[in-house]
Image (cartoon, rainbow, N blue to C red):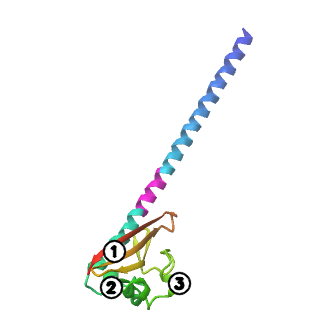
Amino acid sequence: MRGEKGIALVTTLLLMAFGVALSAIVAYSLATSLKVSGSRLDYQNAVQAAKAGEEAVKAMLLSEENLDKIFSGSVNDPDCLKDKLTHSIDYWTACEEELSKIADATKAPDIVFKQGVYDVKVKIIDTRQTATDYYYTVLSRAESPRRGSVAEVLFVYRLEM
């Protein structure tokens, strides 16, 4: 009888250890899925902030108002931006040659603004003019310094003259 009591104790301890291990696996799995969900949500928010940059450029292109009024002082170089809006890329005389054409919104962005927790940087990287239209290639980048989320939206916008 004594030997049987020892087996029951060992069996109980093994079952408890198995239960604790299973609980730890479930807790780790939940924590990981929450982290992934949070990262996905941060990225989706960053994409929406980058799209706000796209909408800002559309509003600017369709507006007749002064650029500084539209963006309340967030235009880095108004003369360069005016060149980008009114001339093909080969005639951007007011812009720094090397930085203005690089497809990197962190280098010499045209417009910078905050969208919630995101820093949005927008840059026109190409302008082409035809007989009837302007074509603008624009890069909008949203970045959250606190969260590390980054999203970029590259688009081409056609504007009839």
Q: Earlier in the sequence, mark 1 or mark 3?
A: 1
Question: Disc 1 residue type?
Answer: Ala
Q: Earlier in the sequence, mark 1 or mark 2?
A: 1
The structure residue drawn at horizontal position 33% and vertical position 74%, both measured from the top left corner, is: 56
The structure residue drawn at horizontal position 56% and vertical position 35%, both measured from the top left corner, is: 23
Q: From this view, report whether residue 16 is shown above or below residue 33.
A: above
- Seen from the viewer's position, the closer of residues 90 and 43 is 90
In the displayed structure image, the side of residue 60 where residue 13 appears, left or right: right
Q: Residues within 10 Å of mark 3 (few under 14, many from 20)?
A: few
In the displayed structure image, the side of residue 17 where residue 56 appears, left or right: left
Image coordinates for residue 150, horizontal then vertical, percent: 48, 65
**Residue linked to disc 2:** 67
**Residue linked to disc 1:** 56
Q: Residues within 10 Å of mark 2 (few under 14, many from 20)?
A: some
**Residue linked to disc 3:** 98
Image coordinates for residue 17, horizontal then vertical, percent: 64, 29
